[in-house]
Image (cartoon, rainbow, N blue to C red):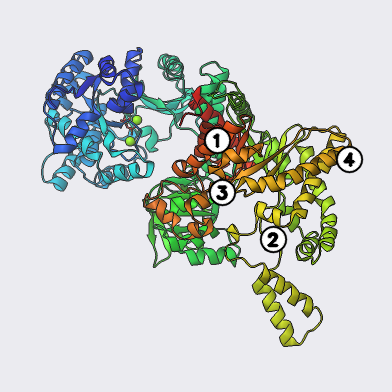
Amino acid sequence: MAGKKWVYLFHDIDKAEKYVGGDWDAVRGLLGGKGANLAEMARIGLPVPPGFTVTTEACNAYQENSKFPDGLWNEMLAALAVVEKDAGKKFGSNTNPLLVSCRSGAKFSMPGMMDTVLNIGLNDESAKGMVALTKNERFVFDSYRRLIQMFGSVVLGIPDEAFEVELDGLKSSKGYKSDTDMTAEDLKSLVVKFKAVVRKEKGFDFPQEPLEQLKLATEAVFKSWNGKRAVDYRRATNIPDSLGTAVNIVTMVFGNMGEDSGTGVAFTRNPSTGERKLYGDYLLNAQGEDVVAGIRNTEKIETLGGPLPEAYKQFLDIVAKLEIHYKDMQDVEFTIERGRLWMLQCRNGKRTAKAAVKIAVDMANEGLITRETAMNRVTPTDVDTLLHPQFSVETKAKAKKEGRFFASGVNASPGAAVGQIYFDADLTEKMAKEAKQDTIMVRPFTKPDDVHGMLAAKGILTSEGGATSHAAVVARQFGVPCVVGASSVQIDMTKRQMTTNGVTVKEGEWISVDGTTGEVFVGKIDLSTPSFEEQTDLLTLLKWADEISSAKGMRKAPRGWPTTGMQVWANADYPKDARRARQYGAMGIGLCRTEHMFFETSRLPTVQKMILAQSDAERQEAIDILLPYQRSDFDGIFEAMDGLPVIIRLIDPPLHEFLPSEEMLLEEVITMRVKGQTKGLAEKEALLEAVRGMHESNPMMGLRGVRLSIDMPQIVEMQVRAIFEAASDCTLRGITVKPEVMIPLTGIVNELNWIQPRLERIAKKVMKEKGVDFSYKFGTMIEIPRAAVTAGELASKAEFFSFGTNDLTQMTFGYSRDDAERSFLVKYVEQGILPKNPFQTIDRAGVGKLMRMAVNDGRAVRPSLEVGICGEHGGDPDSIEFCHTIGNNYVSCSPFRVPIARLAAAQSALKHKGEPVVGE
Ligand code: ADP
Ligand code: MG
Ligand code: MG
């Protein structure tokens, strides 16, 4: 490894950039996010204290042998010499000492990592020198006591309490409220006490040698990469272990030199609302993390101009410059030393979903970023969050103020939940079902036999496990808000209570869980559901999304294939769903299921008569009664979707689903016989016989879909008549209809050959009767592997394909979904046998391959073939991306997921802009 460069001065960023090949992401990988941005700020001329970064490669080399790699220490000393020159001070000097901070900084910000050590280089002698130099004894000993405490706890591993006890003891003996009440003499005595703590805890003295301090601190940062906190955090967030952390050595600047000094943190825009207004806090005469530690009441950043007008003005210029440079909202740290401003950190600021949308839209409108960039600044999860009940930022802030914040963990499944806690699945379920309580299940971790409790719960909290733990996987699968791995929470199963930092919540008491952010609160927090139409920024963003998706040339494809991105349609069975879908931006109905209409109580008896009819005439009689019902259902949907396509699926489930169950009938018959009731007994017995006659051992693969239509064509003939009568009536009322009739469960083209012409004849006949003309389509679902494999043949008949990915997944894997999800699926995902639940995210290698084949073969025969997907996958961003790459015209999902799908479709279009869709 000789010859590798381990250390880069901030002003050597060009060299680092060259070494990694110019890519900024790779620079961040080498120098860590903090180091890369410090160097970048220096490069664009902002005031950054001189410093250097030890690379992540050095960290990784250290991990191999548990010692500094060859050359590292010498490079650090050389860099230090340059820093000394830049700063005009000398490390280890007693008259004009240079002090530095030692800061960890991985590629991705990691709260699990080592804390920073400030004021490295101070010792008994240099402290004296600094007093002489600054004439500020208080400041010097304030810095010194901070060093001993930070070094003691962070580098030497002494529990922080050992120092805090001394500090509190001193303050209370003097009756002080605040740290700033302490005098120079107090701080001096504290230094003595802290040194004694080190001696007592470690058996050796606090190291006086500055270079030893520096070396040990650097080594501690390296070691912290494999500390438990950091490892847990990486597991939970899928950050690879191989990245390593960088170490930043930065010249100290002092915010604790008096009332003309201070330190603060700020966001360039409001991180919770997105408002374009500086947002932050500062403290005068303070250092480091005093602002976030909450030991003193901070001041609002906008008041900084009062005490320090020059520095504030400069700060405003700098943050404006930073936003323009990084083209994103920045989170910055700064310190003012005797009126002089220094920037100590900047990074893209974390933000709420609401702020993410507003900032993206605002920045695009300001011309800072393009609409395309704005599209990628928001995640589908953000949109999801904005459509679900949530805790508003204000109510959460209020709860925090009231001291009700309890713990935080991994945000495993989004959404907000409020409920009473129970510590086992049975009780959670029982209290939910029997006592009708809102419950939250709390467990150290969950296992497959806990699932019933998780399903009954409004929310889930675990103290162990990460983003792919059983609890997390199940919660996401069923959409239950969930926080996992809240490691500060101690669960006591015998006392039936949980505790964090001395706060205890007992079984049956209320908590509030924010699965979107990973926060947990004691007691109830109000939920709010924002209305879609009022979210104007989101509406704007989604309008842009549609513009991106509908732009030509997004996909390169043969003639007839779509070259735009995809449209988003919705699954809707009723007019009210169709209206909602349209309001959410759906461009069509991709699946209208007709059987729901049969289940309505007023219609079910007629449906049953139709099923049990002994003669064709009897059956026709029942069907004639059902016709007007169906017609009016379709009429409402066509009206709601005026101008847009509506795909109506003909009857799909096996007929016995419309009849009472065999067990129930048997019980009734036996009871009647035992009681000697004769009235109605014969009918019941006949019904029982009929149900028995229709029994199927595997209904999923039995007489349903197109098979049923061929067995009993009268039903679908009635449905097609109803569809075309409604469509004709609507046309006569001036509504534009685009009906598409979908035949389910086709497995062989002969099925279409048999049924489709009969139905098309009816369509034509109705239009003739009504004297109207409109265009329509007949097509089929692709949900049986054989259909996908023979798609070329099917396309000779079908004008459109709609992938029913739920059934297609079941049949391709040979899993029955209900059984799989109840028994082995979670384990498969947990063990990594399946990367994801294939019922949530399309299995690209298997099911996806069939889909791609079907599209290619289908369009080879019929280039204009319309292709969509109507399974639940239609609302899943990863599956949406896949559908884009195989050439779908649209995805169809539940109305509530339409906004999410619109964003995901646009993001897919951008990600694959101009790529060809065929060419396996
Ligand atoms: P974190 O990653 O936890 O934010 P930092 O390394 O940014 O840790 O440092 C913690 C605190 O110490 C921050 O408030 C930071 O601004 C401050 N700090 C770090 N280095 C210096 C320095 N050289 N001079 C003054 N303050 C510093
Ligand atoms: Mg920290
Ligand atoms: Mg920081």
Residue at x 64% of width, y 68% of height: 695
Please tell me which of labels 1 and 2 falls first in the chain: 2
Cα gap from disc 3 to disc 2, whole angstroms: 20 Å
- The answer to whether mark 3 and mark 4 are in CB contact below 8 A is no
Q: Nearer the viewer, residue 331 or 701?
A: 701
Q: Amino acid at mark 1?
A: Asp
Residue 48's place in the image compared with 734, above or below, is: above
Q: Which numbered marker is on residue 784?
A: 3
Cα gap from disc 4 to disc 2, whole angstroms: 31 Å
**For residue 272, side relative to residue 216 (left or right):** right
Cα gap from disc 3 to disc 1, whole angstroms: 15 Å
Q: Characterize the local packing of mark 4: few (<14), some (14-19) or many (20 or more) Cα atoms within 10 angstroms.
A: few
**Which dot, 4 or 2, sits closer to the camera?**
4
**For residue 387, side relative to residue 624 (left or right):** left
Q: Which numbered marker is on residue 892?
A: none
Q: Nearer the viewer, residue 820 or 428?
A: 820
- The answer to whether mark 3 and mark 2 are in CB contact below 8 A is no
Cα gap from disc 3 to disc 4, whole angstroms: 37 Å
Q: Which numbered marker is on residue 857?
A: 1
Residue beneath disc 2: 655
Please tell me which of labels 4 and 2 falls first in the chain: 2
Q: Which numbered marker is on residue 769?
A: 4
Location of residue 366 in the rendering, given as x and y in whole percent from the top left corner? 56, 17
**Which dot, 1 or 2, sits closer to the camera?**
1
**Which dot, 4 or 1, sits closer to the camera?**
1
